[in-house]
Image: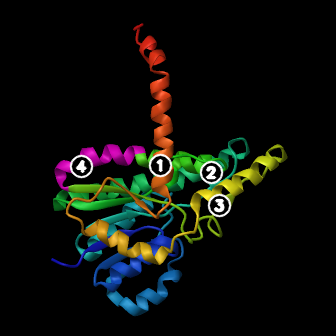
Amino acid sequence: MTDKVWFITGTSRGFGREWTEAALERGDKVAATARDTGTLDDLVEKYGDSILPIPLDVTDREADFAAVAQANEHFGRLDIVINNAGYGQFGLIEEITEEEARAQLETNVFGALWITQAALPILRAQGGGRIIQVSSIGGISAFPNIGIYNASKWALEGFSQALAQEVEGFGIHVTLVEPGGFATDWGGASAKHSDPISAYDSLRETMQEQRRKRLGTPGDPSASAAAILKIVDADEPPLRVFFGTSPLGTAKADYEGRIATWEKWNDVSTLAQGGE
């Protein structure tokens, strides 16, 4: 069996669109979800029955389970499940409203959780499969002005690392893709912004400059297609993989700083357990 069946959320643009096209182009089949499946009309015209567009808002748990079941019934199996749907919520922690915080977690965390839960019985019954969670460099580090986004991706990272250990015995592999800055509309049309508090205006200017230096030149989303194919075709895919050139340096600096701090304060850690 050479062709694979993919289930991908958030396929109207960005990574989801690129990966959908890459899978179809090589002869695979894709159940492609989007809030507006009209954005997929050109792919349906080109690839016909190889693509199954499914309208879906991933925050709707019942609809998530129904979409996964529909895809499995239509194609007869699921080989690769990619939780790509999500968006960036910009705003300093003091600025984030309850509605904004809950909406960010509903999409980025619970949407991925519901799709994952819906797919697992199918993958277990098949004796294997791949689950790919689209995280971020912001899923292992944190940056000002996207704190609630960081929180959502850290949650995704946590449950996915636990999941990988839980399902390994069933032949199911879990991979967290952690992109750096790419020229998608993550920070543009699809992003949401909190109302600013003027007390942070000077900090906001500094943050913008720091972000430009950290991310460097944005990556090309179309180039990521070759990378995702490498991951899904690997016999032993990684639990975590960066997409882009900037994340590794960011991660090294962050984790070196964490270890240095933990070691510096280890006497306090020992004291907390009753040691001297």
Q: Which residues are magenta?
A: 158-171
User: What residue would you read off at disc 4?
Assistant: 167
Whole-angstrom CA distance, mark 4 to mark 1, is: 27 Å
Residue 54 sits inside the magenta stretch? no
Instruction: Tell me: 145 left or right of 272.
Output: right
**For the residue carrying disc 3, how many other residues have a C-alpha within 10 Å: few (<14), some (14-19), or many (20+)?**
few
Whole-angstrom CA distance, mark 3 to mark 1, is: 17 Å
Pinpoint residue 121: horizontal percent, then vertical percent: 25, 55
The quarter in which the C terminus is drawn is top left
**Looking at the image, which residue is at 25% across and 69% down?**
233
Mark 4: secondary structure: helix
Decide: is 95 above or below 122.
Answer: above
**Looking at the image, which residue is at 41% across and 52% down?**
113
Mark in front: 2 vs 4? 2
Residue 251, labelled with which disc? 1
Pinpoint residue 137: horizontal percent, then vertical percent: 49, 54
Looking at the image, which residue sits at the far bottom? 45
Mark in front: 4 vs 1? 1
Pinpoint residue 7: horizontal percent, then vertical percent: 35, 69
User: What residue would you read off at disc 3?
Assistant: 212
Whole-angstrom CA distance, mark 2 to mark 4, is: 31 Å
Q: Earlier in the sequence, mark 3 or mark 2?
A: 2
Residue 146, labelled with which disc? 2
Whether tag 3 and tag 1 are in contact, CB under 8 A, the answer is: no
Q: Nearer the viewer, residue 150 or 49?
A: 150
Decide: is 80 above or below 133.
Answer: below
